[in-house]
């Protein structure tokens, strides 16, 4: 239970972090950071390493700041529905700039947020976390199939702590 509470606290911290708009160059062209394939693969390796150390299997996906899939890794024994779930969790975290566990909690407890469950593109289950660098969301990581939302998010957070530059 303590582990779950610390995950929720970390997710709440991430969702509360100020997110800045991309700065515009003098010519009006936006300058934006984005997740690279190299970083995506390091994050995915970190997710699976963490899950395997806990005796879990998983699938993990990274999307860039535009919501496009950058990379995906899936353990052999993970159910096929989890592949789509991981990608949708990443997309949801990117789109909302908030951890999906926080969004799920809001949809359950805030009447003004309950309709978020009706948007087909969003998946309000823990395991999706935005990737924030220098106050900008550069992409997101989604994990599924690790035995529940807390396990999914735990593997994601461990990979982020290990491989994402500290803000």
Image: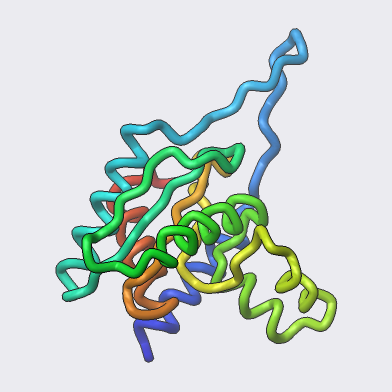
Image quadrant where one finds the N terminus: bottom left
Return the residue nearer the eye: 31 or 103.
Answer: 103
Report if residue 117 is visible in the image. Answer: yes
Across and down, in percent, residue 21 comes to 70, 37
Q: Of 137 and 68, which appears nearest the observer?
A: 68
Tell me which colouring the rendered structure shows.
rainbow
What residue sits 62% from the left and 22% below the top? 31
Q: Is residue 38 left or right of residue 11?
A: left
| Residue 100, image x, y percentages | 56, 67
Left/right placement of residue 92 relative to residue 128 reads right
Residue at far top of view:
27
Q: Residue furthest right?
A: 112
Residue at (41, 51) in percent of width and height: 61
Residue 89 percent across, percent down from the top left: 53, 61
Horizontal and vertical percent position of residue 41 = 30, 41
User: Which residue is found at the position 31% from the left and 61% from the top?
Assistant: 158
Q: Residue furthest bottom?
A: 1
Residue 135 visible: no
Quadrant hosting residue 28: top right
The mark total stands at 0
Q: Say which residue appears at 36% left-offset and 41% top-offset.
A: 40
Q: Measured along the vertical axis of the image, is residue 5 above or below residue 15? A: below
- Compared across the picture, whether 77 is left or right of 104 comes to left
In the depicted structure, whether residue 24 falls above or below residue 132: above
- Quarter of the figure with residue 98: bottom right
């Amino acid at each position: 239970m303590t582990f779950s509470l610390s995950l929720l606290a970390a997710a709440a911290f991430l969702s509360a972090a100020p997110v800045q708009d991309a700065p515009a160059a003098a010519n009006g062209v936006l300058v934006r950071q984005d997740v690279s394939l190299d970083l995506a693969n390091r994050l995915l390796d970190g997710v699976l390493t963490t899950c395997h150390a806990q005796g879990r299997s998983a699938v993990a996906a990274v999307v860039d700041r535009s919501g496009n899939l950058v990379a995906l890794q899936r353990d052999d024994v993970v159910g096929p529905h989890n592949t789509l779930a991981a990608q949708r969790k990443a997309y949801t975290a990117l789109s909302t700039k908030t951890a999906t566990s926080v969004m799920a909690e809001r949809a359950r407890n805030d009447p003004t947020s309950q309709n978020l469950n009706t948007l087909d593109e969003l998946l309000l289950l823990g395991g999706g976390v935005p990737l924030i660098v220098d106050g900008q969301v550069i992409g997101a990581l989604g994990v599924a199939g690790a035995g529940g939302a807390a396990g999914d998010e735990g593997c994601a957070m461990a990979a982020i702590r290990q491989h994402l530059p500290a803000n």
